[in-house]
Amino acid sequence: MVERTDNEIISQLGYGVPGGDVVKTIIFIIFSLILLFVLCGPFSPPETPAAYYKLTQACMLIGVLLCACSAGYAQFVQTSRACDLKKGYKIFYPKIILEAGMLIIFLIICFWTIILGGIFSPFGSLLVVSPIFFLVDFFRFKDISNDVKLIRIIDRGGEEVPRDTVLGNIERFLIKTINRLNIAILILVLFTVTIGEYFVKKYYINLVLYPSDIIKITSSYWNLVISYIIYYLSVVATFIALLPRSYTINQTRKLLL
């Protein structure tokens, strides 16, 4: 009887765990790989300073790897039984790993936004709309009633327990960590499009290092082409971010089952 309840609860609630929207994670990974190809692929500007090239490549690959690990761990959580997971707080791991990966990737995006001239650079459109993603995600994460229920079911070995059970110290710490990572990305983006933009226009900080190379890049045909690519990616990303969670969760179930 416990075994049946265990499987039913995991099936009903597992796909709603933080970071469990694997479809959106995969889409973000695809977008990140496109950005990596644009910045470090065969068609990237030859004038790109070697230090920038290596930094971008390393950080983007680490970020993509973390996002892929998040998707893999989320699938493990969503297809496991309570006795397999053993500790309920593990349901927060996919979201923490995902947020860490996104933070690294957005560090690179913000870096190149400044280098290429601020919000009117190719990456400017993505940064202008990205706060929507993180604000929507922050408010969606406010309701953790299902997470609390699932945590207690896992901790009790499959027995269903009341929703209002108090969270433990580890769970509260992980929830705070997730929120702080989300806010950190939001602050990074807002800092770039405000303070960073000011310093670009007022003090031309993007020309402090490798000025001749950066001027060649910003005046190249490559700069114009990726402006269009990033613009349309931003439009698509905004549409996907605003899709109802219930829809993308259903798509995740179809993908994994």
Image (spheres, grey):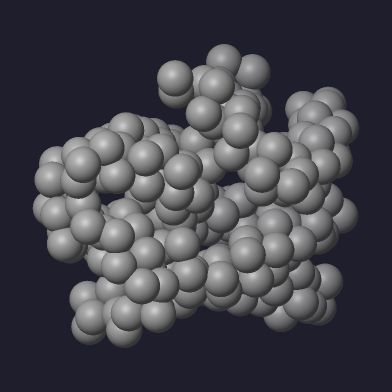
Judged left or right of residue 14, residue 225 is right
Name the foreground residue: 168 vs 228: 168
Task: State whether residue 215 is above or below residue 29.
Answer: below
The quarter of the picture where the N terminus appears is top left
- Residue 124 occupies which quadrant of the picture? bottom right
Judged left or right of residue 52, residue 85 is left
Residue at (22%, 76%) from the top-left corner?
170
Residue at (36%, 72%) from the top-left corner?
162
Residue at (14%, 41%) from the top-left corner?
84
In this view of the protein, can residue 78 be seen by the observer? yes
Name the foreground residue: 174 vs 225: 174
Q: Position of residue 32 (x, y in %)?
A: 56, 35
Q: Which residue is outermost to the top?
A: 42
Task: State whether residue 166 is above or below residue 71.
Answer: below
Q: Position of residue 22 (x, y in %)?
A: 50, 36
Task: State whether residue 146 is above or below residue 19.
Answer: below
Judged left or right of residue 96, residue 195 is right
Q: Where is residue 24 in the image (x, y as percent from the top left)?
A: 59, 38
